Image (spheres, helix red, strand yellow):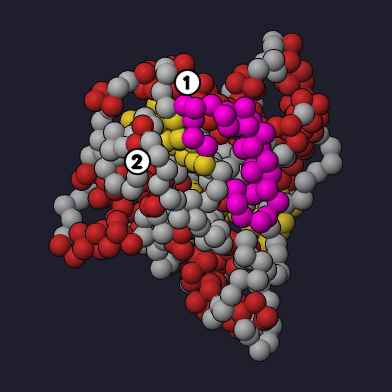
Amino acid sequence: MIKKNFFLTTRIDQNNMYQFITGMCYKDANHNRKKKLIIKQIKLLKRPSISFLLFIFFCFLKGNFFSKEKILKIKYKKIRIGKYVLSSLYKDYFSYISSYSFIYNLIKNIYLASLHIKTAEYYCKNIIFNHVYLDHVYYLHGIYFDFFAVKKKIIYTNDYPGSIFRINFQYKKNLHKLYYENFMRIKFSLNTLKKSEKLKISKIRNKVLGNKKYFDWIKNVKMVEFKKISNINKYNYIIYTHSFTDAQLVFGQSAFVNTLDWLLFTIQKLLNNEKKIIVKCHPSFLDRFEHNIHDRKIFKKYLSKYFNNPNILILDNAYSNKSLINHLNDKCIALTHHGTVSLEMMQNKFKVISSNCNIWDQKYKLTNCWSSKKEYSNLLDYNWDDLKFHNDMHFQNLIFNLFCGDKTHFSKNEHVRVIVKYLKKNRIKSNQGNNFDVNKKDFGLKSDISKKLYNKIVSNYKLCIDYK
């Protein structure tokens, strides 16, 4: 074993946001240390874990690979292999189009999973470290997260709806939670709100919810005003779709392996119940990046058979939701798997059905939520009168905690906002959210980022990191 003490990271970048994210995490890991940790990038080994491949072989013999639902449930030494393999597999558009591509991507990602397990084992056995930064832990890097969590390491990661998380798995309470989504959700907290806090909430409810400029993933989409059509108020349900290729299982494993399966199940169930449905595509489908284009193609491929169905209205343009809901029947029920559109619908006094795999703690009484297909199917059988409205006290507290909290995506201490403040950002050239390239042209700087400026930025690590 190498005797030096290291800080491990999956990213060492010199020209994008990860340069600063890793820097902040590294700075925090060295706090109060006399001897600084040595930063070391995790390199994926090229040899697989034979014991894992044997495990997969026995899973195959038991029939675990003959249904996607069984694949999703596969665990290896507390590592949620099925979740990470399927999440990675469905990033590929062709996994939806061709069964051969699905099988190829399944085999490829299982093999890559074996490399990740072997790599994690190697670093734990041969490298002395307690701190590690991991990016994109809802894909195969989630294998590292689960493995290092069980090994009681201190893990840093960043994701919506928070900023940067520091999770110390030397604490028993964190070992009990174990999986990353249990730390990402907005914590359940109910407080008697002050008058000033209620005023903030009122402004958020009226100005932020439904306003694309506050949501990075749709801010570049040109929204279209919805013009009223005849009989729009005859529809019983409106279904809000999600990306089919991007981070589908990020908030946990629901009863469906991907959001397309959820969508098709929902449509068929409601048609069987003789309901009238609106299906609204996610605004991001109309963005110009490759994964947005693929989402749009998948949407049209699988929903084209419903285009002429008189009981379904398919909205395949980036309609402003605010302009749409003004025309809906007051008893129209909103369906979403997860996401902030449910907040907008609650704000407008609609009843909402959603998965309990969401951005907030399950203790919040907000939607009519489900955790299994049976529960979901039962909810879809309910009449409007059988469903509940959200609890307004819970709703107001969640709005305050999400938008006014110190360490959330929307707070002034969110890592991108802090970094951008120092860089005096004028524009983001790549327009791809928080991982944009950093160069002097993008930020209107007259010179490259100096070491002094870099150190000044990462010294704000305590503002940005949410300690768990």
Decide if residue 111 is on the left or right side of residue 19.
right
- Left or right: where 152 falls relative to 291: left
Question: How crowded is the residue under tag 2: few (<14 C-alpha within 10 Å), some, or many (20+)?
Answer: many
The amino acid sitting under disc 2 is Leu
Tell me the quarter of the picture where residue 7 sits. Answer: bottom right
Residue 67 or residue 7, whichever sits in front = 67
The part of the chain drawn in magenta is 285-314
- The answer to whether residue 5 is seen in the rendering is no
Report the residue marked by disc 1: 271
Q: Nearer the viewer, residue 256 or 117?
A: 256
Please check the rendered image and state whether residue 303 is part of the magenta-colored stretch, yes or no.
Answer: yes
Tell me which residue sits at (27%, 63%) in the image. Answer: 203
**Amino acid type assigned to the residue bearing label 1 in the image:** Leu
How would you classify the magenta stretch by its main secondary structure? helix
Residue plotted at (32% across, 20% down): 382
Q: Which mark is residue 328?
A: 2
Residue drawn at (71%, 69%) of the image? 14
Dot 1: element:
helix
In the rendered image, residue 59 lying in the magenta stretch gets the answer: no
Residue found 24% across the figure and 59% down from its top: 202
Label 2, label 1: how far apart the Cα atoms are: 19 Å
